Image (spheres, coloured by chain):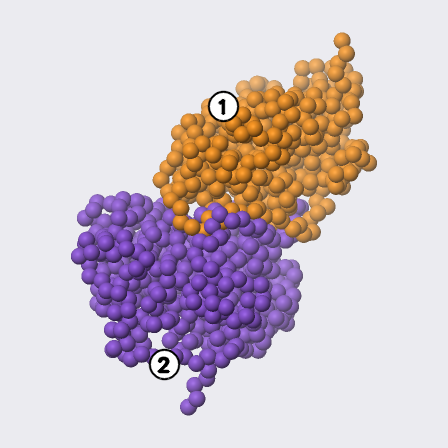
Chain colours: A orange, B purple
Amino acid sequence: MKNAVGRDIPEQVLKEGRRIYEGKYTHDGTYVQRLAPRTRICEKPRASKLVASLKEACLRCGARDGMTISFHSDFRNGDYVANLAVRTLVEELGIKDITIAATSLGSAQDAIADYIEQGIVTGVQTSGVRGRIGEVISEGKLKTPAIIRSHGGRPRAISAGEVHIDIAFLAASSSDDYGNASGIGGKNNCGSIGFAVPDARYADHVVIVTDTLVEFPNMPSTISSIDVDCVVVVDEVGNPAKIATAEARMTENPRELMMAERVADIIAATPYFKDGFSFQTGVGGPSLAVNRFLEAHMRRENIQMGFALGGISSAMCQLQDKGLVRKILDTQDFDKGAIAHLAAHPDVHIEISTDEYANPSNKGAYVNKLDYVVLSALEIDIDFNVNVITGSDGVLRGAPGGHPDTAAGSKCCIIVTPLMRGRMATVCEKVVTVTTPGDCVDVLVTDYGVAVNPLRPDIIECLDTAGIPHVSIEVLKEKAYSMVGRPDALEWEDQVIAIVEARDGSVLDVVKKIKPVRL
Amino acid sequence: MKNAVGRDIPEQVLKEGRRIYEGKYTHDGTYVQRLAPRTRICEKPRASKLVASLKEACLRCGARDGMTISFHSDFRNGDYVANLAVRTLVEELGIKDITIAATSLGSAQDAIADYIEQGIVTGVQTSGVRGRIGEVISEGKLKTPAIIRSHGGRPRAISAGEVHIDIAFLAASSSDDYGNASGIGGKNNCGSIGFAVPDARYADHVVIVTDTLVEFPNMPSTISSIDVDCVVVVDEVGNPAKIATAEARMTENPRELMMAERVADIIAATPYFKDGFSFQTGVGGPSLAVNRFLEAHMRRENIQMGFALGGISSAMCQLQDKGLVRKILDTQDFDKGAIAHLAAHPDVHIEISTDEYANPSNKGAYVNKLDYVVLSALEIDIDFNVNVITGSDGVLRGAPGGHPDTAAGSKCCIIVTPLMRGRMATVCEKVVTVTTPGDCVDVLVTDYGVAVNPLRPDIIECLDTAGIPHVSIEVLKEKAYSMVGRPDALEWEDQVIAIVEARDGSVLDVVKKIKPVRL
């Protein structure tokens, strides 16, 4: 059955009660009945919720076969807690048939790939699937299809009861003995733990894992003790030095800088660029680099940014320190500078949850107030559909993150990407997997030219007025194919290894098992 | 059927699915399934949630006959929003059969008493019932029995789905056009709006009523825009000058000061009085005055308070400014000084919700970490049961507030009250209404002597060691009766006009209609 982005969704997937994607904003104004957790009553005064070990915490929280556990990914590649918790459940308690519902999974969780191969971890629900986990899932080794959700789709699914978390294991940089927990104030700070908030509020059981126990009350804090069952102290919860990945570093590549400058020029040419405008950049090199080119435009116009949203890097903090950004709303920190800035400026650099950030089923997420978002892509096709989950070889190695949410919420969504990566065209006929629908994408900036979505004649007019050249996206695609050749179609087996949920929970696309290459 | 505090609960009340009170902590460790709101999806970008009038907000939120609406009472006697909302519903929209679920109701809401008399407001669920509302309910004019809950019992009932709020009308001192709302940052600040948080999170519809619209994002804020349907701007939301009531002013009465000093001496004589101890005072004159006498003890011992909890007055803020209180956890502010202090010191003077403060069904409210609470009483009987809801004439004119919650959670609960008020004995044989069970009360301090609950031999030993004289509570009762005479028993009709819920939701007591005096 074909959905609104032209993807054929296999009947077997729809048999499980899933709906096909019918287009953006189709649920606006309708009601959803939220589903709240089963909560263990703590009526009696109790001095502390400290338990001696993760094993004991698991036992107290009723660990059992077939359960769903969760983690947040605000420690990014430096996270230790996910591995620790799964190892405890499997090796110390012999728990089987585990579903992992994480905000993201990457190379820090490579060890979990073994448990997938052994058939112990049988379900994965996540935004990111990088590293070995992506590989083993792509090889068809996970018993059930992985479910890929955006950062906003995840709290939607959790609050709707589509994901029921039995135990959330939440890394905290500091916590008191009652579970007031934070991403700052410890020996290993990750900054915002906005990813953990829906888990804390909706999981049946919540275990805080920290390496820095502080006096009660550890307040202000992100996670409130009223949502926490147990607190476990470990040696190290994570390594902040590994938070800043290659994707999150500021580029010095002249080609990327050129694209970033062009993005800033386009922003300055549109009517939303006025005092109080709002802005978000994704984590890719050219996206992040836009910050520095925006500064000159803002100074020339003598305007401030009203708020910056999403994952935050030092570049944005520096813009705020220079007086150019009134508020930063922060779901995760991309480097140590941003972490320290969050701790130092709680009045203007403010932690927010992914529910506040991007959930399409609450009463208005912050993405709905966004003027501009600048995002990267693994592929973009001539319908402006974007793929940020599968490589050109069909293997899972990406993360929708907030991409579909900010694209749908913002007034102007700009994709910035090189026309080719190595010998592969980035602008193509049809993306391998749709992760962001094309009607949410407005402008494409490449190193070989700009294209505007025909759905946005207003933006085309702005660019013409500003003298910014642009071509049709077909021209860019042909340019790419002329240089690297038109790729052969990938060959798939029938097995669906991943379901890509639209942010509203419908099926946007599926990923099938790629046919092994025959040598 | 008799409950655990010896009260005979009429069968008619229990027929409605209610349980009798079986004693404290009986639900500890059991599970409760929470019930979440029905939420209207706001998937589509939308510039603003501003609506032109309260009437329009009511219409957008589906106002209908038979619904339940709610308000918070952080503006105390200076609140304008409750009257405004009810008047709009009744006069402009003709809505009938309204249940009001407020955090408290007092003389500021006297106008609502008319709607009770007219049979338009048919249900009242509240902590406080002072002023005309208390009178008309006592006269049997409310169609259904009022339900009296503690500050912790209310969020318990809301999260358990026992109170289902259709529309919450929440006064905010400042808000942006998306509904990020706060008790500070406006022209009329009330300080903490911790009372409003459960309503914001659990009501089907939330209307923010403010008189100060600020730029988005009004962050940090107490209420998040993701929970808000509409924002309405009115001329004035309340009068902060009326927040400080007579009950919340610092006493200069020498008899009250003497009792306060004795309370401080008792605190200093018990083992919990050490660095990091935690403390709360109620709003009564002698309770509040304890702050000043504690200071000398703390300086002598060279210790700090770890945290102060609950409703906060300037006296506590001054203690913090002097370096004697590490953290203040604030559910409501009792005067302008405390409001300004909350705004100025967000790092150490921290707003908390009533859920965090006192809900007995979450995973550990802050009252569970409380060492000392000092509370007042309208009456206390020889079983140490306390009444803070009905006057000696049987009329509703009080508020359990956090009394039952802090008494149950704290290690040492001290009641301070004069032995008599006018010609009425405060210490008596049997209180008119039980609002706090006697086994949660540890010490009674009066102007004629101290009594310790026999359940606490450890505290008796402390007082003996410190040379603080004490007698049995029977001695105090007899002393009172010898001076003002033993009162005649009140005469009641059969009609139950109010149900006093224990904090766990069971029936602690009922209040019947008092027989009219025949002249």
Q: Secondary structure at mark 1?
A: helix
Q: Is A108 on the left-hand or right-hand side of B368?
A: right
Compared with A101, A112 (above or below) is above
Residue sticking out furthest to the left: B467
Residue type at mark 2 is: Asp
Query: Toward the viewer: B188 or B155?
Result: B155
Residue at image location 46% in from the left, 25% down from the top: A239
Task: Give coordinates of residue B418: x percent, y percent.
Answer: 28, 69
- Picture quadrant of residue A467: top right
Query: Can residue A229 be seen at all in this image of the molecule?
Result: yes
Residue at image location 27% in from the left, 79% down from the top: B484
Q: How far is disc 2 from disc 1 in space, using C-alphas?
A: 76 Å
- Picture quadrant of residue B150: bottom left
Residue sticking out furthest to the right: A1
Query: Toward the viewer: B62 or B142?
Result: B142
Q: Secondary structure at mark 2?
A: loop
- Picture quadrant of residue B254: bottom left
Task: Give coordinates of residue B489: x percent, y percent.
Answer: 39, 79
Numbered badge on residue B488: 2
Q: Is A29 on the left-hand or right-hand side of A349?
A: right
Residue at image location 51% in from the left, 74% down from the top: B496
Instruction: Write down the residue under mark 1.
Output: A242
